[in-house]
Image (cartoon, rainbow, N blue to C red):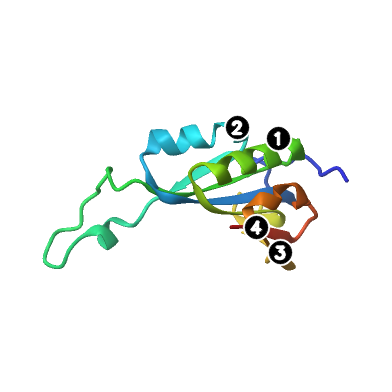
Amino acid sequence: MTQPAQTRTDKGVRGFELDLHVAFAQPLPEAQARAALLMLEGFTLDLYRPHPAALRREGEEASLDTDAGVPSARLTGPLRDPEVVRAALAALLVGPARYVEVGVRGFLRSAQGQTDWMPWRRNAVLPRARVAEVTFEPGVRFVLE
């Protein structure tokens, strides 16, 4: 099944994109987190960090702590080569990842560029060693832990 290639700049469209969330075993420095995800180039990368207010102790001012590390990341974009994605998942799961959620997710993008993601139709949980069983059917999220 081939998916139509969509990009984040398309407006007023709907379709399906790969949606991949990686939770690292421990927060990584930004450079190390980006390096761990290099095999997945060509996707939009969002590095998630804790909110500065969550990092402060009671009585302290909230400040941006750039050394707090990156606990997780999200990659989205058109699925071009499932085998490359499976190889990257296998590498992440024997390396820095605690778990990975991956699937091809439906979206609606408004004329203003706002993206609304559709809910997953089904979830499938697999052991980390069974990456080869990940299928990229629309609406199915695989959790590899």
Distance (Cα) linking label 1 and label 3: 20 Å
Amino acid, disc 3: Ala
Marks 1/2: CA–CA distance: 8 Å
The tally of labels here is: 4
Q: Earlier in the sequence, mark 3 or mark 2?
A: 2
- Side of 72 relative to 7 (left or right): left
How busy is the neighbourhood of tag 4: few (under 14 within 10 Å), some, or many (20 plus)? few
Q: Which mark is residue 127?
A: 4
Q: Nearer the viewer, mark 4 or mark 1?
A: 4
Tell me if label 4 and label 1 are in contact, CB under 8 Å: no
Crowding at mark 1 (Cα within 10 Å: few <14, some 14-19, many 20+): few
| Position in image of residue 112 (x %, y %) | 60, 51
| Marks 1 and 3, the one that precedes in the sequence | 1
Whether residue 29 appears in this view of the structure is yes
Q: The residue tagged with tag 1: helix, strand or loop?
A: helix
In primary-sequence order, the first of circles 4 and 1 is 1
The Cα–Cα distance between marks 4 and 2, rounded to whole angstroms, is: 21 Å
Quarter of the image containing the C terminus? bottom right
> The residue tagged with tag 4: helix, strand or loop?
loop
Disc 1 marks a residue whose amino acid type is Val
**Res 62 → quadrant:** bottom left
Q: Quick check: 133 left or right of 100? A: right
- 1 or 2: tag closer to the N-terminus: 2
Query: Relative to residue 23, is residue 86 depicted above or below?
Result: above
Residue picked out by circle 3: 124
The secondary element bearing badge 2 is classed as helix
Q: Residues within 10 Å of mark 3 (few under 14, many from 20)?
A: few
Residue visible at 63% across and 53% down in the picture: 128
Residue at point 25% right, 47% down? 65
Residue 84's disc is 1
